[in-house]
Image (cartoon, rainbow, N blue to C red):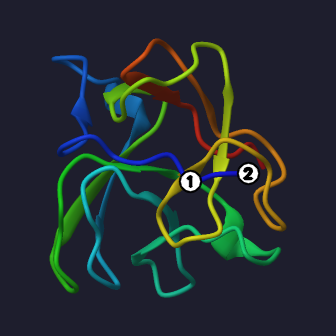
Amino acid sequence: MAIIAKSGTPSLSAVLPPQNDQFQLIAGEAIAAGDLCYIAAAGTALRSNGTGTGVAAVCVGIAAQAAPNGEAVTLYRNVRFHYGAALTPGAKLYVGATAGQIDNAATTGGTAPVGFVVDATRVFIHGSYY
């Protein structure tokens, strides 16, 4: 398993992402553009982490922009994102064992795919189904 490196600053590849698949929250920690996130019990967005099982290994969506702790952040799901370089189209994506990151193989907590690679630079994130 390997974390997929971000190439530049990840960004939406669609001009108008689906309105029903946006979650506007307050960041419970510093979040970078392209980080996978979940909703904590306090209702804040935190970076997903596949090192263990439980709510932290869930992916509610991907952050479109960086947000410092305590500021607004929008998470998206069912979207294409400019994310990496030299990616393998069709490869499944998982919550990484490093907070917020995407992995190309299942992790301890990230056992179900949260997306897939569209082409050499873009990913599609559908989030966790639960």
Q: Amino acid at mark 1?
A: Ile
Badge 2 element: loop
Horizontal relation, residue 61 to residue 33: left or right: right
Residue in the picture at 50% in, 14% down = 118
Quarter-of-image position of residue 10: top left
Q: Disc 2 marks which residue?
A: 1
Residue in the picture at 82% in, 74% down = 53
Q: For label 1, count other residues whose C-alpha is less than 10 Å away and answer few (under 14), some (14-19) or many (20+).
A: some
Residue 42, given in percent of the width and then of the height, sits at 48, 87
Horizontal relation, residue 98 to residue 63: left or right: right
Residue 27, given in percent of the width and then of the height, sits at 29, 76
Residue in the picture at 62% in, 60% down = 96
Residue 67, given in percent of the width and then of the height, sits at 18, 69
Up-down relation of residue 24 to residue 109 (above or below)? above
- What mark, if any, has residue 114 been given in the picture? none
Up-down relation of residue 30 to residue 35 (above or below)? below
Count of numbered badges drawn on the protein:
2
Q: Disc 1 marks which residue?
A: 3
Residue 23, given in percent of the width and then of the height, sits at 36, 51
Is disc 2 in contact with disc 1, using a CB cutoff of under 8 Å?
no
Badge 1 element: loop
Up-down relation of residue 48 to residue 85 (above or below)? below
Quarter-of-image position of residue 92: top right
Q: For label 2, count other residues whose C-alpha is less than 10 Å away and answer few (under 14), some (14-19) or many (20+).
A: few
Q: Amino acid at mark 2?
A: Met
Horizontal relation, residue 21 to residue 58: left or right: left
Up-down relation of residue 76 to residue 27 (above or below)? above
Real-space Cα distance between discs 2 and 1?
7 Å
